[in-house]
Image (cartoon, helix red, strand yellow):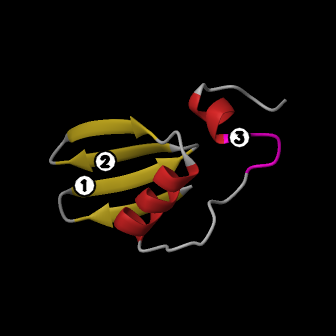
Amino acid sequence: MCVRPREDGRVTLANRVLTVERSGERTRERIVTDEGLKQALGTWFGIHLDEAPKIPGRTAVSAAAGEGRA
């Protein structure tokens, strides 16, 4: 989980869901690929990785579908 405060709200990335809150409005985007996860971490949090972090027992597809551990 990553949370970053902003002047007009905050940005949260948790369980491959990016939530951007601005001036009281909220948008959510599900991150379905490892490349998308790396891009979101770099763009919103300044975290630049060679590989996307892995959650044991989950894949990008199962996380996007909201599935639990296998």
Badge number at residue 9 = 1
Residue for badge 3: 59
Q: Quadrant of residue 39?
A: bottom left
Q: Residue at x 15, y 48 (%)?
A: 23
Q: Position of residue 45 (x, y in %)?
A: 41, 68
Q: Judge depth for marks 2 and 3 and give the one in front.
A: 3
The residue that mark 2 highlights is 20
Of callouts 2 and 3, the N-terminal one: 2
Q: Nearer the viewer, mark 2 or mark 1?
A: 2
**Can you give x and y, in whole percent of width and height, for residue 28 in the image?**
35, 37
Q: Amino acid at mark 2?
A: Val
Dot 2 surroundings within 10 Å: few (below 14), some, or many (20 or more)?
many
State which tag comes first along the sequence, 3 or 1: 1
- 38 in the magenta segment: no
Q: CA distance from mark 2 to mark 3?
A: 23 Å
Identity, as a three-letter code, of the amino acid under mark 3: Thr
SS state under label 2: strand
Label 1 Cα crowd, 10 Å radius (few <14 / some 14-19 / many 20+): some
- Looking at the picture, does residue 2 appear above or below residue 14? below
Query: Does residue 10 appear left or right of residue 69 in this picture?
Result: left
x and y percentages locating residue 12 in the rendered image: 42, 52
Q: In the image, what residue occupies the spot 60% across and 25% down?
A: 65
Label located before the other in sequence (2 or 1): 1
